[in-house]
C-alpha cells in the first residue's frame, strides 16, 4: 500500500474539520477527493504534507508510520503538493519556473541547458511535453497546471501528488 490514512481526526478547538477519515492509495491509483468548500479536503492533505498535525490517527507511507513536521520531510518521503494559489513567475521561462528552488548549477552558476534537459525529461516521462525555453506567459493556458505539477516532481522526486484545484 502506497498510502494509508487511518482514523484521521483534526480539531480546531471545538470545531472538527476531519472526523475519523480513512483513505488508502495503492501504487498507480488516481483518486479525486470531492466535496463542498469547508468539507476538509485541503485540511486532510495539509496533514499528509506536514503543514498541519492530526489531532489523532495514523499515516503510513509504504507501510511505514510517518509524522511529518514540515513539508520538507514529506517531500523527502516522495509526497508533493501543488497548492491552489501557486506562484509562477511571468518573466521566467518554463524551465526556470519548474526548477526554481532546485536550480542545477555548473561552476557555481545556474545551468539553463541542464534545467531545460530536466524539464524535457519530465515532459517525456509524464507525457506532458512543454517548451522549456518559452516564457511562461506565452505558454498555453493549460501549461500552468503542468508547470505546477512539474515543479512538484523536481522538488520531491515524488510518487504521491495532491493538486488542490478550483472549479471555476
Image (cartoon, rainbow, N blue to C red):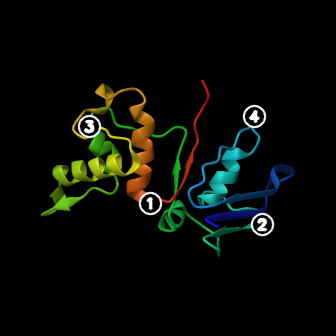
Q: Earlier in the sequence, mark 2 or mark 1?
A: 2
> Which type of secondary structure does the marked residue at label 3 adopt?
loop
CA distance separating discs 4 and 3 = 36 Å
Q: Earlier in the sequence, mark 4 or mark 2?
A: 4
CA distance separating discs 4 and 1 = 29 Å
Any mark on residue 131, and which?
3
Residue drawn at x 23%, y 51% as measured from the top left: 117
Q: Quadrant of the N terminus?
A: bottom right
* 44 left or right of 17 in image: left
Residue found at the far top of this picture: 168
CA distance separating discs 1 and 3 = 22 Å
Mark 4 Cα shell of 10 Å, populated few (<14), some (14-19), many (≥20): few
Q: Is residue 113 above or below residue 50?
A: above
- Give the labeled residue for mark 4: 36
CA distance separating discs 2 and 1 = 25 Å
Could you tell me residue 40's position as x and y percent?
74, 45
- Give the labeled residue for mark 2: 57
Amino acid at each position: 500500500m502506497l498510502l494509508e490514512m487511518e482514523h484521521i481526526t483534526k480539531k480546531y478547538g471545538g470545531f472538527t474539520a476531519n472526523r475519523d477519515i480513512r483513505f488508502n492509495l495503492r501504487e498507480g491509483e488516481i483518486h479525486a477527493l470531492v466535496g463542498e468548500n469547508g468539507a476538509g479536503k485541503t485540511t486532510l492533505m495539509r496533514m499528509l504534507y506536514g503543514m498541519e498535525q492530526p489531532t489523532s490517527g495514523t499515516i503510513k507511507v509504504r507501510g511505514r508510520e510517518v509524522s511529518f513536521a514540515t513539508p520538507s520531510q514529506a517531500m523527502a518521503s516522495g509526497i508533493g503538493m501543488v497548492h491552489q494559489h501557486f506562484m509562477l513567475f511571468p518573466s521566467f521561462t518554463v524551465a526556470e519556473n519548474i526548477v526554481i528552488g532546485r536550480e542545477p548549477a555548473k561552476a557555481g552558476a545556474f545551468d539553463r541547458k541542464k534545467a531545460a534537459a530536466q524539464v524535457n525529461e519530465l515532459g517525456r516521462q509524464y507525457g506532458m511535453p512543454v517548451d522549456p525555453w518559452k516564457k511562461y506567459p506565452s505558454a498555453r493556458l493549460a501549461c500552468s497546471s503542468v508547470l505546477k505539477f512539474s515543479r512538484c516532481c523536481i522538488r520531491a522526486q515524488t510518487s504521491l501528488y495532491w493538486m488542490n484545484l478550483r472549479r471555476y
